[in-house]
Amino acid sequence: MPVLPGLLAALGAGALAYTAGAHAAATAGLGVVRRGPSSRRVAALTFDDGPDPIYTPRVLEALAAAGARATFFLIGERAARYPQLARAIVAAGHAVGSHTQRHRHLWTLAPAATRAEMRLATEAIAAASGVAPRYFRPPWGTFNLAAYRYAATLGQVRVLWSLRPEGWRPAPSADALVERVARRLHAGAIIDLHDGVHSRIAPPAPPAAVDALPALLDLLRTRGYRCVTLDELLDPTRGDLVPRGLGGRLWEAYERAWARAYRLEPVGDEGVITAGLAPHRGPAVTLRDGTVVARGDVVAEVHYNRHFLRRLHLQVTDRRRAVALIRASEGALRDLAALVATDPRYRAVRALRATSLFWEGAQYLGFEIMPMESAQAQRVLGWYLRTLMARDHPQGRRRLEGRTLEPRILWMSREELLRRHRPSGAPAMG
């Protein structure tokens, strides 16, 4: 091969690895946070390209009115220009991250220029806000290799997003933005919005995001979501299960796919249980208050969240565990009753349905205990639930030794749920 073409090919391959290769790794989630744990009903609103003297105050006002917290990825030169806004963000309880010094596309920058953009932004944001940024998000969400590595040197967590309702071009209307969030919202979502316009050629995203923010916050409240900073979303002290090794990651991917297929989402901030809406596929069931659940009726399928069960086993002694589980279940059912009473998606729910190995005492929570519809279903679900228990319990399979655990179906009508567990003062759907 001639020297010059070979050299050009090598340079091209290096440039491709420096830009698109690093970005592909980041997009795949390698060393980059794209979403939080799915174990709690929380979401993180993030705002890029500020602070802006027009839009940032409106964003702060809307967040304060809703009692919501967010994370602002600030441009360094803008933070230096408007330090009072940077301080106001921190004073209101929000978190800050770095969005580089001048919002230059990192694919156009050499390593030294990239590091300078990130270092200067970190210094400017810390000086303006009084807080060193803990997070880094590159302009347009596009990494190069130098930025990927230097973020670790600065001690900053690399963050992208799992939901970007503004899209790219053309910018959506406020109503369309809210509708996109409503359609794609999920537990642990990191939602990317803008509170500043970084250049004349950029789409006018901030006006739409700012105009949509009150309705977006109302949607999150109606869905039972709490808006938190990235600090809280990614809090490592909560003890949520972290997948280890290839097997753990594959299992986590399977569970996410399963939860997505059945539209399961955590109920309440603590995420004790998850719930999803599904048609009843078994024979008709008549409950003690006269509610008839016919085939095809909508039921709320309820499951204990295994992150919660793991924490329970690790943090609570055997003697107190049963009481702790009952109290946590009561709180979770109150959260579910509030959701059923206010969320339009739950309007058609006839009853709750759960399958559990630990059904003794469930009647004290208002459930009716019934056998499985068939022996085959009992064998299959029993094996699956025992496998989950052996996997997640600290004692593993030893916990199952000498115990006969057979699953049962737990039912509770919508009316019984609201009668027993609906919080006082919770509004009903119109």
Image (spheres, rainbow, N blue to C red):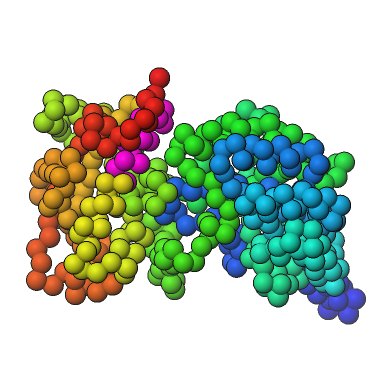
* Stretch in magenta: 332-344
- State left or right for residue 385 relative to residue 101: left
User: From the viewer's perspective, is residue 179 above or below residue 259?
Assistant: above
- State left or right for residue 388 relative to residue 189: left
Quadrant location, the N terminus:
bottom right
User: From the viewer's perspective, is residue 137 above or below residue 18?
Assistant: above
Of all residues shown, which one is farthest toward the top?
430
At horizontal 38% and vertical 51% (from top left) the residue drawn is 271
At horizontal 23% and vertical 52% (from top left) the residue drawn is 326
SS assignment for the magenta stretch, majority: helix
Query: x, y percentage for residue 91?
Result: 67, 52
Query: x, y percentage for residue 390?
Result: 24, 68
Q: Is residue 214 visible?
A: yes
At horizontal 11% and vertical 31% (from top left) the residue drawn is 288
Query: x, y percentage for residue 159?
Result: 63, 59
In the depicted view, which residue is nearer to us: 271 or 145? 271
How many numbered tags mark residues here? 0
At horizontal 19% and vertical 44% (from top left) the residue drawn is 365
Of all residues shown, which one is farthest toward the right?
4
- State left or right for residue 336 relative to residue 159: left
In the depicted view, which residue is nearer to us: 255 or 396? 396
- State left or right for residue 258 relative to residue 181: left
Query: x, y percentage for residue 396?
Result: 25, 73
User: From the viewer's perspective, is residue 302 above or below residue 121?
Assistant: above
**Is residue 105 a member of the stretch shown in magenta?**
no
In the depicted view, which residue is nearer to us: 169 or 420? 420
Q: Quadrant of residue 213?
A: top right
Quadrant location, the C terminus:
top left
Q: Is residue 374 visible?
A: no
